[in-house]
Image (cartoon, coloured by chain):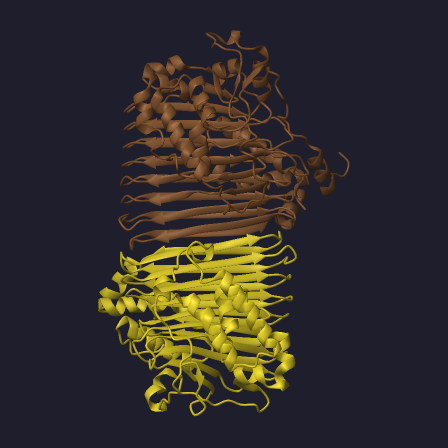
Chain colours: A brown, B yellow
C-alpha cells in the first residue's frame, strides 16, 4: 500500500455510502398521510384490536394534541411535520406463513442484505427473531421452543389479542401515555412491536431478538415493546435497527417498557444503525425513543446500547429502582460523524433501599457532529444506602465536532454515595506514534484505540452483537481523525 | 403589587434623582426595559431549576432606603478583618459611610461608583468598561437600571496594592424590609495586583434582599484575589452576579465562603479573552437550618492555552439545600485548554439535599477537561481512628470536615482572613479545636 494519509482516510469516509442503503420494493399497504382521531381508530381497527385498546389509543391521542414538542435537548433539526407522515404501513403479503419458504423472496433478500437471513439465524445463532419490517411482525421463529418453557414472545398486536390480561395490566405502567410528547404519539399510533413474557423462575434459554427496519418512504416507525420478567426469571433481549437511505428525514418514535418483578433480571441490548444522513447532513432518521424499566425487589435491569446511526438521536434508557436491593445499569457507546447529533444518556431513579446503579457512557464525536450525554441520578429521601457510580468519557476527533456533558445529580438522603466523573480527550499523537512504530498503520491504530476506549461497554454486549458492534464502530469512524 | 411592578414603577422616581442626560442613563433605560420583559427568573429556566426566588420575592421591600444611619465602629468591628490595615469601602443600607471608610486616590483609585458615574474625569473609563460584560438577564439588568452606588476600584499599571481592600455592605433594619442593589466596577491594569474582601452583613432580623453586580477586568498579567464572605442572618438573601473578563496571562481567583443567609445565589462568570489565562474559583459551603446556597459558575474558554480550576466543597445539615451548577465551555479556537472541575458534598441529615449539575460543552479536540462530583458521608474508619485516640465525636467530626475543606483553605493568601474563616467554621460546627489551620 502506498502512503495512506489522513486526508485519504477522510476522503474515503466522505464518499463511503451507507452500506444498508437499499430499498425493498415490496407491495405495502399504506394509510393516507396525516393524523386525526379517525386514523387512530382506523389503525386500531386494522389491527383488530379490542375496544379497550382503541380507547387507550384515543386517550393518548387526546393528550398528545395538547402537548408541545420538547426543545430542551441539545439538538437542532427541522421539526417533523406530524401531518405529513403516514402512520401505518404494512407489507401486503398476508396472511402469515407456516414455513419460511412461503415468505416473499424479496423480503428474504432484504434480510440477507442485513445479514440476518432467517434460516441461518435459525440454525446457527439459536436466536429467536421477531422481524419487524415497517411495523408488522412478519416472521417469528423458535416460538415453539420458547412455548415449551411457557415463554411468550410474539408481536404486540398478537399479544393484545391472545394475552389481553397481561398487556392490559402492564402496558403504559412504566411509560404512561402522557409521559412525553413522543411517548404519547407512540401510544396513539403504534403499529406493532414485540411482546415478551417470561414466567416465574424461568431462565430464557436463548437471546431474544428483534430487528427493526424502516422501509417505506415517508412512514414513521412507531414501535412498542413490552418485556415482562416474572419473579425470579431472566431474559436477554437484543434489538437491532437499520433503515435504507432516504433523502427526507424519517421519524422513529419507539417506546420500550421493561418490567422486572422480584428477583428477575432483564438485559436489554441495542445496536442502532439507522441511516445517519449523507456527508452533507441531508436526510437521516430522527430517533426519538422512550425506554424505561421498572425494578421490583432484588431485580436488575441492564441497558447496553451502541448508537452509531440516526441523524438526530434523543434517547434516555432509564431505570426506576423501586424495590429494595434492585440494581440498574447503563452502558452506552454513542458515535456521531458528519452532521449527526446525539443527545443521549440515562435516568436512574433510586426509590428503594440499598439500590445500586452504574452508568458508563462513552461518546465519540467526529466530523461536524455534536454528541451530548445527559443523565439524571436521583436519590429519594427514603432510598437508604443508595449507591451510584457514573463515568462519562468523550473522545473528540477533529476540531469541528463537539462533546457535551449534562449530568444532573439530586441527592436527598444522607447515606447516599454518589460518584460522577467525566473526561474529554482526543486520541493522543503519542498513542498513534506508538502503534505506527510497531508497524500498525494509522487507520488500524485508530480502530484499536477506539475499541480500547469503548471496551468496557462492548464487553457487556452478547457475543453476536459484540462482533457486529465492533465492526460498526470501525465503519462509522474510519479516517475521521484530524 | 408585585415586586417587579414596584421596581418598574419606582424607576421613574429613581430618574428624578439622577442625571437623565448622561450616556449612562441610556444604559439604565435599556436595562429596565429588559427587566420588564425578562422579570425575575423562575424555576422554569434551566439555570434556576433548583432555586426558587418565590419566598424571597413576596416580601414588601423598600427600594430606596430613606434614613441615613450611623453606626459606631466598635459595634461592627467584628465584621471586619480588623487585624490588618486595609482600605475600606463601607455602605450602610446602600449609602456610603464616609467615617467608617478609608478610600484613596493616591496612586490608585479606591472610591465610589457614584463618583465614577457622575464625574467627567471618569467618563472615558465608564464608557469603556461599565456594563460591558454583565449579562443581559433579568437580575443583572435590574441592577444596571438602578446602578448608582458601589465600589469603584481602578489599579494602574505595575501597581501592587500594599494592603487588601474590604468592601462591606451593612443593612440596619431601620426599614421593615429593604432591597439593595450595589454595583461594583473593578479594573486591574497590566501587571497590577490586588486583594479584595467582600461581605454583606445584616444587623437585624428584618428581611434584606441584595442583588449585587460586580464587573472585574483583569488586564495583561494582572493578578486579582477576590474573597467573598457570606455569613449572613437567616433573614437575609443574596443574589451575587460577578463577571470577570480576563486578558492574556492574567490570573483571577475568586473564593466564596458561604456559611449563612436564607438564600444565597452566586452567579460567577469568567470570560477568557486572551491566551495563557488562569481562572480559579473555589468555595466552601457549610449550611444548616433551612438555608439554601446555589453556586452557578461559568468559565468560557475562548482562546488557546488557558486553564481553569474549580473546586467546591459543601457540607449540608438539617433542612439545608445546596445547588452546584458548573459550566465549562471550550470554544473551537481554545485548543490546549486545561479545565478541571470538582464538586464534593457531604450530606449530614436526611432532610438536607444537594442537586449538582457539572456541565461540559466542548468544541475543541486537543483539550484536557474533566469534572468529578461526589456525594457521600464522612469516612467511618477515619472517625473510628480519631475516636479510638480519645477525641470526642463532635471534635472528630469537625476535624474531618476541616480536612475535607482544606484544599480550598490552602489557597487563601491572607493569613488573617484564613484565621477568621477557620474560626467561623469552628463556631459553626460548635467546636474549639485550639489550633489554627
Please, is residue B86 above or below residue A138 in the view?
below
* Residue displayed at 63% across by 79% down: B125
Please, is residue B105 above or below residue B252 in the view?
below
Q: Which quadrant of the view contains residue B1?
A: bottom left
Given residues A41 and A18, the one toward you in this image is A41
Residue B414 located left or right of residue A21: left
Position of residue B267 measured from the top left corner of the image (x, y, whole percent): 47, 65
Residue A155 visible in the shown view: no
* Residue displayed at 53% across by 40% down: A334
Given residues B156 and A172, the one toward you in this image is A172
* Residue displayed at 56% across by 57% down: B329
Position of residue A285 measured from the top left corner of the image (x, y, whole percent): 57, 33
Instruction: Please give the count of numbered marks on the rendered protein.
Output: 0
Residue A12 located left or right of residue B370: right
Residue furthest to the right in view is A2
Residue B406 visible in the shown view: yes
The quadrant of the image that shows the N terminus of chain A is top right
Given residues A400 and B153, the one toward you in this image is B153
Residue A218 located left or right of residue B172: right
Given residues A241 and B32, the one toward you in this image is B32
Q: Which quadrant of the view contains residue A152?
A: top left
Position of residue B293 measured from the top left corner of the image (x, y, whole percent): 38, 64
Please, is residue A77 above or below residue A24 in the view?
below
Position of residue A156 measured from the top left corner of the image (x, y, whole percent): 40, 22
* Residue displayed at 29% across by 66% down: B288
Amino acid at each position: 500500500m502506498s502512503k495512506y494519509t489522513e486526508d485519504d482516510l477522510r476522503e474515503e469516509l466522505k464518499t463511503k455510502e451507507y452500506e444498508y442503503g437499499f430499498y425493498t420494493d415490496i407491495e405495502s399497504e399504506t394509510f393516507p398521510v396525516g393524523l386525526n382521531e379517525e386514523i387512530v381508530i382506523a389503525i386500531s381497527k386494522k389491527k383488530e384490536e379490542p375496544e379497550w385498546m382503541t380507547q387507550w389509543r384515543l386517550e393518548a391521542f387526546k393528550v398528545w394534541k395538547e402537548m408541545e414538542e420538547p426543545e430542551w435537548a441539545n439538538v437542532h433539526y427541522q421539526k417533523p411535520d406530524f401531518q405529513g407522515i403516514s402512520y401505518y404501513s404494512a407489507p401486503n403479503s398476508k396472511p402469515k406463513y407456516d414455513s419460511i419458504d412461503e415468505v416473499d423472496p424479496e423480503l428474504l433478500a432484504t434480510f440477507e442484505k442485513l445479514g440476518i437471513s432467517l434460516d441461518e439465524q435459525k440454525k446457527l445463532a439459536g436466536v429467536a427473531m421477531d422481524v419487524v419490517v415497517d411495523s408488522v411482525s412478519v416472521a417469528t421463529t423458535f416460538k415453539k421452543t420458547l412455548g415449551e418453557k411457557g415463554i411468550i414472545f410474539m408481536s404486540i398486536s398478537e399479544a393484545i389479542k391472545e394475552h389481553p390480561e397481561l398487556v392490559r395490566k402492564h402496558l403504559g405502567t412504566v411509560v404512561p401515555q402522557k409521559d412525553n410528547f413522543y411517548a404519547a404519539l407512540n401510544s396513539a399510533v403504534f403499529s406493532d412491536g414485540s411482546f415478551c413474557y417470561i414466567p416465574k423462575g424461568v431462565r430464557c434459554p436463548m437471546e431474544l431478538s428483534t430487528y427493526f427496519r424502516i422501509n417505506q418512504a415517508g412512514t414513521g416507525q412507531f414501535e412498542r415493546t413490552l418485556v415482562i420478567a416474572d419473579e425470579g426469571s431472566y431474559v436477554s433481549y437484543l434489538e437491532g435497527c437499520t433503515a435504507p437511505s432516504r433523502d427526507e428525514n424519517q421519524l422513529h418514535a419507539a417506546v420500550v417498557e421493561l418490567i422486572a418483578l422480584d428477583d428477575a433480571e432483564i438485559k436489554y441490548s441495542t445496536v442502532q444503525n439507522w441511516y445517519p444522513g449523507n456527508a452533507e447532513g441531508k436526510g437521516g432518521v430522527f430517533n426519538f425513543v422512550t425506554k424505561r424499566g421498572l425494578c421490583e425487589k432484588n431485580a436488575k435491569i441492564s441497558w447496553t446500547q451502541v448508537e452509531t446511526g440516526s441523524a438526530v438521536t434523543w434517547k434516555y434508557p432509564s431505570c426506576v429502582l423501586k424495590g429494595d436491593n434492585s440494581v440498574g445499569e447503563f452502558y452506552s457507546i454513542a458515535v456521531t460523524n458528519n452532521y449527526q447529533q446525539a443527545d443521549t444518556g440515562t435516568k436512574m431513579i433510586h426509590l428503594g433501599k440499598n439500590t445500586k446503579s452504574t452508568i458508563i457512557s462513552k461518546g465519540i464525536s467526529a466530523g461536524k457532529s455534536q454528541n451530548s450525554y445527559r443523565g439524571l441520578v436521583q436519590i429519594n429521601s427514603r432510598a437508604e444506602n443508595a449507591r451510584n457510580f457514573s463515568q462519562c468519557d468523550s473522545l473528540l476527533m477533529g476540531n469541528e465536532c463537539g462533546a457535551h456533558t449534562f449530568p444532573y445529580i439530586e441527592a436527598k438522603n444522607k447515606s447516599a454515595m454518589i460518584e460522577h466523573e467525566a473526561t474529554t480527550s482526543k486520541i493522543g499523537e503519542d498513542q498513534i506514534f506508538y502503534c505506527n512504530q510497531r508497524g500498525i498503520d494509522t487507520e488500524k491504530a485508530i480502530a484499536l484505540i477506539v475499541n480500547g476506549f469503548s471496551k468496557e461497554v462492548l464487553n457487556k454486549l452478547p457475543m453476536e452483537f459484540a462482533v457486529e458492534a465492533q465492526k460498526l464502530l470501525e465503519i462509522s469512524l474510519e479516517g475521521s481523525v484530524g | 403589587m408585585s415586586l417587579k411592578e414596584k421596581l418598574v414603577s419606582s424607576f421613574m422616581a429613581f430618574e428624578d434623582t439622577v442625571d437623565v442626560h448622561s450616556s449612562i442613563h441610556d444604559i439604565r433605560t435599556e436595562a429596565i426595559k429588559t427587566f420588564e420583559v425578562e422579570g425575575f427568573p423562575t424555576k422554569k429556566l434551566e439555570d434556576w431549576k433548583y432555586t426558587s426566588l418565590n419566598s424571597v420575592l413576596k416580601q414588601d421591600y423598600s427600594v430606596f432606603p430613606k434614613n441615613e444611619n450611623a453606626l459606631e465602629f466598635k459595634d461592627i468591628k467584628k465584621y471586619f478583618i480588623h487585624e490588618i490595615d486595609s482600605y475600606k469601602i463601607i455602605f450602610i443600607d446602600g449609602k456610603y459611610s464616609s467615617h467608617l471608610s478609608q478610600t484613596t486616590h493616591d496612586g490608585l483609585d479606591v472610591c465610589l461608583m457614584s463618583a465614577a458615574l457622575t464625574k467627567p474625569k471618569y467618563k472615558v473609563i465608564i464608557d469603556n468598561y461599565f456594563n460591558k460584560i454583565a449579562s443581559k438577564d433579568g437580575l443583572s439588568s435590574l441592577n444596571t437600571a438602578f446602578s448608582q452606588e458601589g465600589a469603584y476600584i481602578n489599579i494602574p499599571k505595575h501597581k501592587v496594592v500594599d494592603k487588601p481592600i474590604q468592601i462591606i455592605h451593612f443593612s440596619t433594619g431601620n426599614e421593615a424590609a429593604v432591597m439593595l442593589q450595589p454595583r461594583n466596577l473593578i479594573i486591574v491594569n497590566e501587571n497590577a495586583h490586588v486583594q479584595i474582601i467582600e461581605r454583606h452583613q445584616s444587623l437585624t432580623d428584618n428581611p434584606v434582599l441584595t442583588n449585587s453586580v460586580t464587573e472585574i477586568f483583569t488586564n495583561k498579567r494582572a493578578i486579582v484575589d477576590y474573597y467573598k464572605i457570606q455569613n449572613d442572618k437567616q433573614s437575609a438573601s443574596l443574589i451575587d452576579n460577578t463577571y470577570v473578563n480576563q486578558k492574556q496571562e492574567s490570573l483571577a481567583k475568586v473564593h466564596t465562603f458561604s456559611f449563612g443567609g436564607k438564600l444565597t445565589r452566586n452567579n460567577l462568570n469568567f470570560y477568557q479573552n486572551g491566551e495563557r489565562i488562569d481562572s480559579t474559583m473555589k468555595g466552601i459551603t457549610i449550611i444548616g437550618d433551612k438555608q439554601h446556597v446555589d453556586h452557578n459558575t461559568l468559565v468560557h474558554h475562548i482562546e488557546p492555552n488557558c486553564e481553569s480550576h474549580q473546586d467546591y466543597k459543601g457540607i449540608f445539615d438539617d433542612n439545608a439545600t445546596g445547588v452546584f451548577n458548573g459550566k465549562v465551555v471550550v470554544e473551537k479556537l481554545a485548543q490546549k485548554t486545561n479545565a478541571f472541575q470538582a464538586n464534593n458534598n457531604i450530606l449530614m441529615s436526611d432532610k438536607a439535599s444537594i442537586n449538582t449539575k457539572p456541565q461540559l460543552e466542548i468544541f475543541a479536540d486537543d483539550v484536557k477537561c474533566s469534572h468529578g462530583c461526589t456525594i457521600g458521608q464522612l469516612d467511618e474508619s477515619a472517625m473510628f481512628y480519631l475516636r479510638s485516640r480519645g477525641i470526642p465525636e463532635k471534635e472528630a467530626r469537625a476535624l474531618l470536615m476541616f480536612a475535607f475543606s482544606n484544599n480550598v483553605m490552602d489557597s487563601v493568601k491572607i493569613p488573617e482572613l484564613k484565621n477568621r474563616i477557620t474560626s467561623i467554621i469552628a463556631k459553626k460546627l460548635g467546636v474549639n479545636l485550639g489550633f489554627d489551620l
